Image: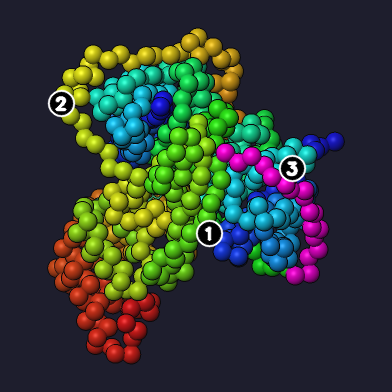
Amino acid sequence: MNIIVCVKAVPDPGEICRLKIDPVTKTLLRCEVPLVINPLDKHALEAALELKESSGARVSVISMGPPPAEAIIRECMALGADRGILLCDRAFGGADAFATAFTLARGIERAGPFDLVVCGMASSDGATEWVGPQVASFLGIPAVTMVQEFESRGSDIWRVRAEWQEGYRRVEVRLPALLTVTRELNQPRALSFSGILKARKKTVESWDLGTLGVPAECLGSRGSPTIVSRMETIEVRRNAELLQGTMEEKAEQLVSRLAAIGII
Amino acid sequence: MGKHFGPVWVLAELNDCRLEAVSLQLVGKARELADELDVACEVVFLGHGIEGAVPDLIASGADHVYIGDCAALELYQPFPYRDIICSLAREHAPEIILIGSTFMGRELAPLIAARLETGLAAHCTGLRHDDDKNLELQIPAYGGLMSIICPVRRPQMATVARGVFKTPAPDTARKGEVVRIPVPEATDMPARTLEIVRKPAAGIRLEDARVVVSGGAGACNPEGWEKIRELAQALDAGLGCTRPVVDEGWAPLHTMIGQSGKMVSPLAYIAIGLSGEQQHMVGISGAQLLVAVNNDPKSPVFGQVDLGVVEDCREFLPVLIAKIRAYREARPGCRE
Ligand SMILES: Cc1cc2nc3c(=O)[nH]c(=O)nc-3n(C[C@H](O)[C@H](O)[C@H](O)COP(=O)(O)OP(=O)(O)OC[C@H]3O[C@@H](n4cnc5c(N)ncnc54)[C@H](O)[C@@H]3O)c2cc1C
Ligand SMILES: Nc1ncnc2c1ncn2[C@@H]1O[C@H](COP(=O)(O)O)[C@@H](O)[C@H]1O
């Protein structure tokens, strides 16, 4: 079985609040925020690695991103991925979800035959949730989003359980297929020292526009149907009255303020 | 001569035999947008036994309702749903398609956009036409508001959560036309929904709650989260959360408040250990009283609420919960 995992390098969610709109120029203030594996993509990789261990599979990781994203792919290889591919070219920059998905789909096709593509449900910085289903569309395969459990796995028919409002949805899907996964699916493993050592010897393949052989106008900002037309800053509306005193006193004041509007 | 525009579309959806609130809200918005372009407001509605809901769609502003009604479409099925909607869209060339950020919409919207080779904006909190009559799709980002447009391709597509737009007042005198669309007998379905299981959550629904307690990363650990849950219980409040809480697994995704989660409009909103990021705060509207508990006096959350308590929530909440219980016991008339 060949499994492809789409992994995105994202600015560390713990530090993303440092990215702000400049109130004067209305553009994004540039600053260095370290890149990490998109949290949900760890669950996507874990799903692939567990399948590799239980049924035998070759796991390839693919990412579209800037050169520093290579470190993220190497981390996936240290965790157990067999192959790593970075789609990296200036021409891929400025892509919206549509162009990102298109580029990834062309990369996946080039990587060879596959049975399963696994994505995270959402990325922590983009969070459109669309790259997965759109990759599937461009590959012409079915997609099931927000998978939280594999119920049964036949040779080419799988049954999965996906999030759905307060309950769940049971779906039967025919491989090759793309699944986007939620954190309920598994518990991602931790990096091991021996894994890190082994990954040092592996190479990350870097593919550019020429390797993909796709016209540049289909990729990056040129291939994106949407553009950002404007950024605005939002005025803060309120200024809090800070309650004073000991912890007990603050609690008492809060109770009476809540009671005053009739909610206690 | 001005530009010629196509109709404005909404995809409507049933939830447990009732129209999703967001469907009506989007019809209300689509009506406004259609009037600005001087075109029809149209609804596409797939399912089984759905005709009873059509009058509500018309009363909310729809001129035409395309319905595809058959047993095979009772449950959301990605393949026939996508194919029916895309072929109808090719025929009628809508200018705009609005879709609720429901579980169906979140999967179906990108499938439709990819097939129609057009742009889509996720979880919009505002929609308006710019001077060129392009639809500005607004989403909160980086502490501000980002406007996205899809200048060349059509339709312009957006998903919107329930509660972003108001439910329009129904006008039962409005007239509209129902158009039955042919549905394919049997299609090959590489992905097939077998069943949808509903497990109504215990406790108070966030959307209906008069008081919402919302917890963030400041809960620190499961024990800290438990205290926040207890506070919600003591106040008969709905319990919401921020994204890191979902990532940690302390609370389920459907209780996340904000741009990519639920929109709530309680009387009072109490934020515990969260920083007041825009993507979360856009989820709260119309609250009379906003309260924040945070151990960092410089936290941006204090710029967005009425009342602030600077304390470590793990120590403060047990004290607060005890005071709330004592207050209630002293007034036996109060509901417990
Ligand atoms: C496109 C996009 C969409 C998003 N959609 C959503 C969404 O719908 N909903 C959502 O919530 N988020 C969303 N996010 C994430 C959002 O940007 C923030 O990252 C998130 O809301 C922050 O959560 P938080 O406030 O709990 O965590 P943090 O920002 O880490 O804040 C934690 C706060 O807790 C305080 N604290 C720490 N310890 C304690 C303690 N012991 N006692 C009291 N206070 C303490 C800290 O001072 C801090 O202010 C989205 C992000 C993106 C990019
Ligand atoms: N640039 C990228 N490279 C690789 N995978 C990506 C990229 N962007 C998004 N993905 C995948 O798509 C999922 C959903 O992302 P998004 O649509 O941005 O919320 C992520 O969890 C990844 O699995």
Are discs 1 and 2 less than 8 Å apart at CB? no
Residue positioned 25% across, 82% down in the render = B327
The residue that disc 2 covers is: A193
Q: Quadrant of residue A39?
A: top left
Mark 3: which amino acid? Leu
The residue that disc 3 covers is: B88
Q: Is residue A199 left or right of residue B126?
A: left
Residue positioned 45% across, 13% down in the render = A208
Please tell me how crowded label 2 is: few (under 14), some (14-19), or many (20+) other residues with Cα within 10 Å: few
Q: Between A69 and A160, which is closer to the camera in this rendering?
A: A160
Residue B206 in percent (x, y) is at 43, 65
Q: Which residues are magenta?
A: B172-190
Q: Is residue A69 above or below residue B201?
A: above
Residue positioned 70% across, 48% down in the render = B9
The residue that disc 1 covers is: B163
Residue positioned 33% across, 16% down in the render = A204
Is there any visible trace of residue B122 in the rendered image? Answer: no
- Image quarter of the N terminus of chain A: top left
Check the residue under mark 3 and report the chain it is in.
Answer: B
Is there any visible trace of residue A164 in the rendered image? Answer: yes
Q: Nearer the viewer, mark 3 or mark 1?
A: 3
Residue B29 in percent (x, y) is at 65, 54
Give the spatial CA distance, label 1 vs label 2. 49 Å
Q: Is residue B186 magenta?
A: yes
Mark 1: which amino acid? Gly
Are discs 3 and 1 less than 8 Å apart at CB? no
Q: Between B299 and B239, which is closer to the camera in this rendering?
A: B239
For numbered disc 1, what is the local secondary structure? Answer: loop
Q: Between A202 and B302, which is closer to the camera in this rendering?
A: A202
For numbered disc 3, what is the local secondary structure? Answer: helix
Give the spatial CA distance, label 2 vs label 3. 56 Å
- Image quarter of the C terminus of chain A: bottom left
